[in-house]
Image: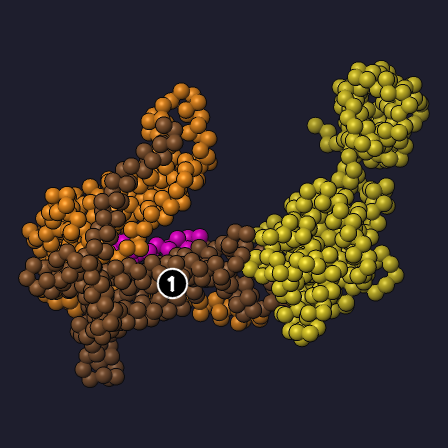
Chain colours: A yellow, B orange, C brown
Amino acid sequence: MTGADQPAELVLRDVRKAFDGYIAVDRCSLSLAKGEVVAILGPSGCGKSTLLNLIAGFEEPDFGDVALRGEIINKVPPNRRNVAMVFQNYALFPHMTVAENIAYGLKARRVSKAELQTRVAGAVALLKLTGFEDRFPAQLSGGQRQRVAVARAIVVDPDVLLLDEAFSALDRNLRDQMQLELSLLLRRLSVTTVIVTHDQQEAFTLADRIAIMKEGRIVQVGPPKEVYRNPADSYVLRFLGRANSLPGVVVQHEGRRCVQVGEGLVVAHDLPAEGEVSVNVRAEDVVISLVPTAAHRHSPARVVLVTSLGAQQRVVLRLDDLQVVAEIPTASIADWDSLHRNAGVYVDLRPGSFIVDQRSSA
Amino acid sequence: MSERSSRLSRIALASYGLAVTIFIVLPIALPVAVAFTSSDNLAFPPQGLSLRWFAAALDNPQFMTGLRLSFFIALGSTIMATVTGVCAAMAVARYLFRGRVAVQAIMLLPLSLPAIVLGLGLLFVLPLFGMRNGMVATMLGHALLGLPYVFSMALAAFSNYDSALERASLNLGAGATRTFLFVTLPLIRGGVLAGGLAAFLLSFDNISLSLFLSNNDTLPLRMMQQMQSYADPGVAALATMLLTLSLAALLIIVPAVSRSGSNSK
Amino acid sequence: MRALRPWLWLLPAGCIVVPLFFLPTAMMVRNSVYRDDPVRFIVPDFTFVNYFTVLSDPYYLRVFGNSLWLATLVALIALVMAYPFAHLITRVSDRTRLMLLWVLCLPLYVSIIMRVFGWIIIIGDLGLLNQLLMKIGIVAKPVRILFEFEGMVVGMLHRYFPLMVLPLLASMQKIDPVLLRSASNLGAGRLRTWYSIILPLTIPGAVAGTQLVFAGVLSDYVIPMLMGSTRFPVTAPTIFLEAATNASWAKAGAMGIVLLGIVLAINVVAGVWIGRAAPWTRRT
């Protein structure tokens, strides 16, 4: 159940929450070991924020339990749980200085003045906010505000740290930098953390395990690399990385069951789906070659557009009347001239990398 | 916080709200009830029901002339306040000029001036313009009182839509006047109506300025005199009729205001 | 010509504001330094004797003091009453909120005459309250509430209560609800959330409301005249008395300017106070 063989720190057991008939969280179970960082990943509306609210105590589960160190905390009000949250827009108190914001949780816990000052100073140093203690939130930049929000949460020494889309308010460069910093910080502090996000990069940078959520259910849990390489279904495959979803038909070819995509591409397939199917494959698993491959049948695919993504090149191809997006490492291109618009190339799918779904027949 | 104490505090808060509501409504509701009495006194609850006091109020020449006068004064002062207020709001909202902040503050200054100081001062200023007490003087005084309200509400209405709309109109060939009449005015209609209504009610009910500027013949002053001399339900009846009229006016205008507000942007 | 545009738009307002606002104010200032003459009413002069009288004579000091005391009392009561009411308004459903706001604003557009009428019915000598008290047996004779200081307080409170609630409500509604969630998440219970988050963030609204009520009560003429008592004279009716009855225009002028000065001072103090108590609202 847990990622490591340790007693579970935070356990969600069969948790269910509905609003006015709409089921936001549908029997989710999750177990975190102490110090583990788990990211709940999913599109907006999948129920991940509700899950976080259930852990924080802002919502009460209709069914199932939330347990902290073995103790069920369903009925414990949010201000009595030791779970600190970093909100999406940080929710810094505008009328308090940075130091007062950070001290707030400690004051509520009636920590002695001396201890409070020490701990606040510690958090300030840890989050590199020295010199900003007397500033007001309005005088801080976005990155600094995030640091204050994090400092405020960790200074109370929470049992669980919750991050609610904590990076979505930052721009790209700042986001990358802050994710790295926070990742190092979390490892240093060894704090059990639940991250909720729709950003794959955030989850991959920070988490020990990721949980993919779809329409209120957790569909796959595991270390990031594993979930990426072995997606449980096409939803997970499409959610992580850039994917194609190509219509195809199951055919018999040279004695084997295959899927035919368009007119020209036939690949081996041994999954149960029959008839009309969808082939889900990641862009990086679309193989381009200049000579015909074993999978190839008819005319070549035509290059429509080549876009540089830095270390990768995105190649948009036209395969019969289908559009296929491929990604190939820039360094692997020996002959750039062969990738001009309208060039003919041959396409294959890396075996075992694609997932075939049944398409509902008309 | 336990569930029960939070329920208790919710009930306490609701009861408090009810108490305050009763406090506010009672002095207004009771005269309405008393206006329907059939007797001569102000006893509550009224001993019998009748419409005689309504008839008496409508028959009272003092009331009726006062009503007519107050209505015209209010109308005149509202028009003046609205025209000046909207134009001033136009200046402040659409132009960046030196002294803009000061002008804004000055427009709201009449709100801070005690009416008594204004009234006394006007008494001395009127002869300078060859004016005496009367309808026109009162109209002017009330216009000044209504101006800040129209100004601030029109200003708020201006900030609710994009000034690019006016620029688009000019770009398409319409002149400044046409733009103002056919683009600007309809878009700020809500704020103008709200401000105008406020100015009208302010003028209609005004006592402190009318004392100085009129000949003691506006409706509120007449009602005041009546109340001080006779204290009979006739005043209540008249006041009830006026209340009904203003409520009716509100019911018509408020939807128009909110409609115009949702149209813009 | 372009630069003149805004001023053209301001012209109509100027035609009203200059002669009807600045001029009368200037007139009052002028009057205040003129002299009262028993025979010819008011004579040109340049003297501060009126100010001297108005600010040192015990009678006038008492009048100002009464007004300030009345204003303070009404503002305080209104403030205490307004907080829970505003809090309630933020928590109810949209429809109830509209209704509450409508009720709240009733005193603003219902004629004062009608309200005084209502007070006569309720707290007059023969009014409901007295009837109730006598029936229960607490008092033997009717208690004089109306036409006394207490009656004035009630009348003022009723009239100016909305002016306290509305700015307070506005500042309460501006509080991001996420802040309250965050406070709770960090361990604050209801009480702590109230005084550490809600109260400080509503100070600007409270100060604005207090300023409006204070200035309003100070300058009010109608309510003291209709519901007050001669034993508790306040500023505005006294000014009227001096002018209309005693024909002491200069003295009335001085009193008026002093009143104006107090009101303006309150505005300034309120602004400074908000800046100090709520430094986060200042633009850095």
Name the residue that disc number 1 marks. Answer: C210
Whether residue C178 is visible, yes or no, is yes
User: Seen in the image, is B59 located left or right of residue C84?
Assistant: left
User: Seen in the image, is A33 located left or right of residue A215?
Assistant: right
| Range shown magenta | C94-110
Looking at the figure, which quarter contains the C terminus of chain A?
Answer: top right
Which residue is pictured at 80% across the width and 25% down the height?
A: A315
Pick the residue in front: B201 or B153: B153
Residue count near mark 1 (Cα–Cα under 10 Å), binned few <14, some 14–19, many ≥20? many
* Outermost residue to the front: C46
Pick the residue in front: B144 or A181: B144
Which residue is pictured at 19% across the width and 79% down the height?
A: C142
Q: How many marks?
A: 1
Q: Is A294 covered by the magenta stretch?
A: no
**Quadrant of res C238:** bottom left
Image coordinates of residue C47 in percent, x first then y, are 20, 61
